[in-house]
Image (cartoon, grey):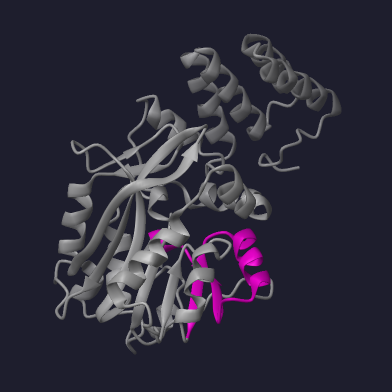
Amino acid sequence: MTTHQLSSGDLTADRRAHYARLYSESGDLAAAADLQRQALELAPGWAAGWYQLGLYCEKSGDANGAADAFRETIRLAPADIFGAGLKLSLAGLTETPATPPAEYVEALFDGYAERFDKALIENLGYRVPERLAGLVAEVAGADTQFARVVDLGCGTGLFGERLRRASSWLEGYDLSQGMLSVAAGKGIYDHLGQADISAGAEAAGLQAGPPADLVAAADVFAYFGDLSTAAALAAGMLKPGGLLAFTCEAGDDEIEWQLQPSLRYCHSKAYLISLMEKAGLTVEKFERETIRCDKGEPIEGYLVIASRRQAVAATIPQLARGLMVGEQEPASALSSAQPSRPN
């Protein structure tokens, strides 16, 4: 047994955790927390159980109990696959991380992969793929054929499906093997690979190739706070005149970026415009609209198309050293990272 497993490995503990869940669903969160504690007395090394206790305590208003449970979760699972550290940040108990743990994001989407498309499109009214593809066509021209398109955080390929006909070569990257597996089954990508774009260009795991005509990051930057590394990576992949298409959840003007209760980040318009300028990109389209719903409430987001200027600003760390994805010098560091399953 590992601490990441949803089962405690103890039948009695699992039974009590099951009853706790039933009490939670009926609205009796205090009883749910009590039964969950009883389960953890039998299985004290069960990280997933401690995280669940933290959620029960949080919902019941027991902030101290939630914090203790989340701290124990991290002690048992230091990679923070459950995102307990983000919960502590929201409570003001720790500094907000600029990016969430990669292990948390990977596990989140691995568990979500098989139902991802249906959940977003049918249940949440997800509109990003159609709207972002439409803005790309407005800027580039409806009949434009892109020689190389890179879909960062491609997920199951929802945006890639809209780009396929306009792309001579389409490659996609994602942190989640589960999402890549679903994307592979659609047969729309010429290349798929696992990559962590939060690590920067040299360590991300991207395939070397010629500069791209279009780099996309649809509904990806909501899992980043500080976007400077991701923006530098995207700008470094583009040829002069190439386009970056991305979305963000809309934040208040007073902040640059902020972690939300959903454990996703939002960003301000001023921050995004400044970020594009520093990355040597010119904003071509900047639209604010509802991108989906969450718990019945509309989520406002920004849809942005930016083009790379002829000379990219030297403030970008990767480009300041003359390194661009596709050039010969860093090719060894940007070798292909194919998933273990066929793509």
Answer whether residue 193 is magenta in the image: yes
Q: Position of 9 compared to 44: left or right?
A: right
Residue projecting furthest to the right: 11
Instruction: Specify the quadrant of the image occupied by residue 23.
Output: top right
Instruction: Specify the quadrant of the image occupied by residue 19.
Output: top right
Answer whether residue 20 is magenta in the image: no
Is 152 drawn above or below residue 166 in the view shown? Answer: above
Is 188 drawn above or below residue 257 in the view shown? Answer: below
Q: Position of 5 compared to 219: left or right?
A: right
Which residue does the image show at 18% across and 36% down from the upper left? 254
Q: Position of residue 155 (x, y in %)?
A: 54, 61
Q: Position of residue 41 (x, y in %)?
A: 72, 19
Is 193 drawn above or below residue 61 in the view shown? Answer: below
* The N terminus, quarter of image: top right
Of 226 and 103, the residue lying toward us: 226
Q: Position of residue 207 (x, y in %)?
A: 46, 79
Of 116 and 22, the residue lying toward us: 116
Which residue does the image show at 76% across and 36% down from the upper left? 7
Q: Position of residue 302 (x, y in %)?
A: 31, 51
Instruction: Specify the quadrant of the image occupied by residue 15.
Output: top right
- Residue stretch rendered in magenta on the structure: 169-198
* The C terminus, quarter of image: bottom right
Counting the numbered discs, the total is 0
Q: Is residue 194 visible?
A: no
Which residue does the image show at 33% across and 84% down from the upper left? 211
Which residue does the image show at 65% across and 64% down from the upper left? 182
Of 310 and 88, the residue lying toward us: 310
Of 205 and 274, the residue lying toward us: 274
Q: Position of 245 compared to 55: left or right?
A: left
Q: Is residue 205 visible?
A: yes
